[in-house]
Amino acid sequence: MTPEPKPTDGARATPVLELADVAVRYRGAAADVVQGVSLAVEPGQSLALVGESGAGKTTLLRILLGLARPTAGTVRFDGEPLAPRDRRQMRRFRRGVQCVFQDPYSSLDPSRRVAAIVAEPLRSLGLDSRTTAAPKVAAALERVGLPADAASRYPHEFSGGQRQRIAIARAIVCDPRVLLADEPVSALDVTTRVKVVDLLAELKEERRLTLVMVSHDLSVVASLCERTAVLESGRLVEQGDTAQVLGDPAHPYTRRLIDSVPRLPV
Amino acid sequence: MTPRDTPPGPLLDVRGLTVRTDDGRTLVDDLSFTVGGGERLGLIGESGSGKSLTTLALLGLLPDGMTATGSVELAGTQIVGAPEKRLTAVRGRDAAVVFQEPLTALDPLMRMGRQIAEPLARRTGLKGRDLRTAVTDALVRVRLPEPDRIAHAFPHEISGGQRQRVALAMALACEPSLLIADEPTTALDVSVQAEMLDLLDTLVREREMAVLFVSHDLAVVAKVTDRVLVLKDGRAVEEGPVLDVVTAPKAGYTRALVAGARKLESALDLRSPR
């Protein structure tokens, strides 16, 4: 079932992440790949970016992650403009915003043991030494449902679903507030996908984690996100509560997306 | 369509098909199934179930280091152990394949028109302007807009959905009796996938072509096939009419598969607050 949007009492909380009138044009390109996008990620209101290939979902996610900069418009983190050169802000940002990518094969360094991979955010943020990181790593691995001996093994010893669990452990080990996920379950088999979606739903609840998820899979979006924004060719055509956007879409493109999802015969 | 003398018995008859690696691992284990003329069978399984290897074995396309044993009879021709020459005669004419990733299935250095012309010329003997017309017709049949532009384009110049249509046009060019489709829509966007499934459905219906549709996605398979075979770790765990299997799965594994798909799907049954 779709998570119910939580009631907001009067004044809205400051968005953790906010895009205001953002546009992106790649060098040498004739047109913007993303145009005039404004959206806000509020605490506790997980947001899905939905659309088809080339719609600009991943470009927006990279901007939210600070990996790319918009050619126009502003990105705000906790209400302040995001400044990749401001090291103190970036440290707070990296601590608060972590990510999980689509392909669990290319996103984990094959030459490092799982313990080192999962400890990476703690070490690079200067929060822990190798010894103080160990118990946190063990706790994170346990939380995502991996066996205790996983820490001393290498990524190739794990299946796709387990690797995605390792990536999730790495993302939650420093207790972030926001988890950005790019198609986190689309490379997984159905039975595995259900389990990873359940895990993400649990983490959202227990850790007050806000997800920002890029996905073309509307059922995954509906399972995890309170809010949905629909992108078509770089523009936002619709955004709002997931139940409203997917349950009663206002835009024909959203309607077409929903109607295209193959359903099992009853 | 030219009627061919079809021998009695099913179009595709697989008995005890087993695929082993040279180091002794069994990847497909004693698989038996049949596909009759005009029939549509779905092969369902998750990664590592052996479904793609099965399709490769059907056309004698297994990679080096793997051997098939058992029997695969396609339109009366034994495929297992057949010499390359006999396989070449079968491929395209009796059965043709559409693979998951059109970008790797198509030659990146060859214009689309030429790629379709090759199998067409071989089968029909057409040349010059007639061949060009036949190529355009093949592209129109898979409902590609601007067929002449597409014929002149290289694979990277057209979209993924268009590439998969070209791959389908190539597979259909020789009017095979059996179309093997290995995850043909998995790499496509949902709306493109829906169009592609409709197209595939119409085209094979018009031609009374048999289909072996391989996918991990039950809902997709249910749209285009009549009967399904569920594979797990190289073995068949369940077979039956698609409606029976998705509404009343018998094997524990199929039950888990259906439950998973239904659980995800149920999230979409939203009641709007508006």
Image (cartoon, coloured by chain):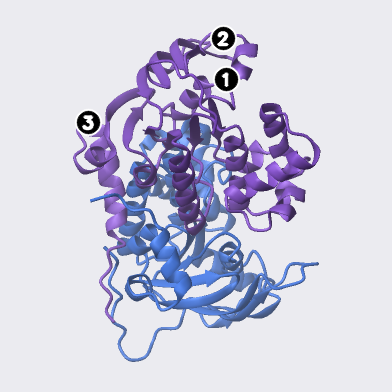
Chain colours: A blue, B purple
Q: CA distance from mark 1 to mark 3?
A: 35 Å
Eyeballing the image, is B72 above or below A91?
above
Q: Residues within 10 Å of mark 1 (few under 14, many from 20)?
A: many
What label sits on residue B251 in the rendered view?
3
- Amino acid under label 3? Ala
Residues marked 1 and 3 touching at CB (< 8 Å): no
Q: Which mark is residue B90?
A: 1
Q: Is residue A132 visible?
A: no
* Dot 2 and dot 1 within a common chain: yes
Residue type at the position of mark 2: Ala
Task: Locate residue A130 relative to residue A8 in the image: left or right.
Answer: right
Q: Residue B82, labelled with which disc?
A: 2
Looking at the image, which residue is at 47% across and 14% down?
B76
Of badges 2 and 1, nearer the viewer stands 1
- Residue A189 lies, with reference to residue A12, above or below; the image says above
Mark in the foreground, 1 or 3: 1
Q: Residue at x 57, y 20 (%)?
A: B90
- Would you say A16 lies left or right of A44 here? right
Q: Earlier in the sequence, mark 3 or mark 2?
A: 2
- Looking at the image, tell me whether mark 1 or mark 3 is earlier in sequence order: 1
Label 3: chain? B
Whether the residues at callouts 2 and 1 have beta carbons within 8 Å, the answer is yes
Identify the residue shown where x is 49% and y is 36%: B181
- Displayed quadrant of residue B129: top right
Q: Considering depth in this image, is A247 or A16 the residue closer to the camera?
A: A247
Q: Mark 2 vs mark 1: which is more N-terminal?
A: 2
The CA distance from mark 3 to mark 2 is: 35 Å
* Image location of residue B274, percent across then percent down: 29, 82
Res B39 → quadrant: top left
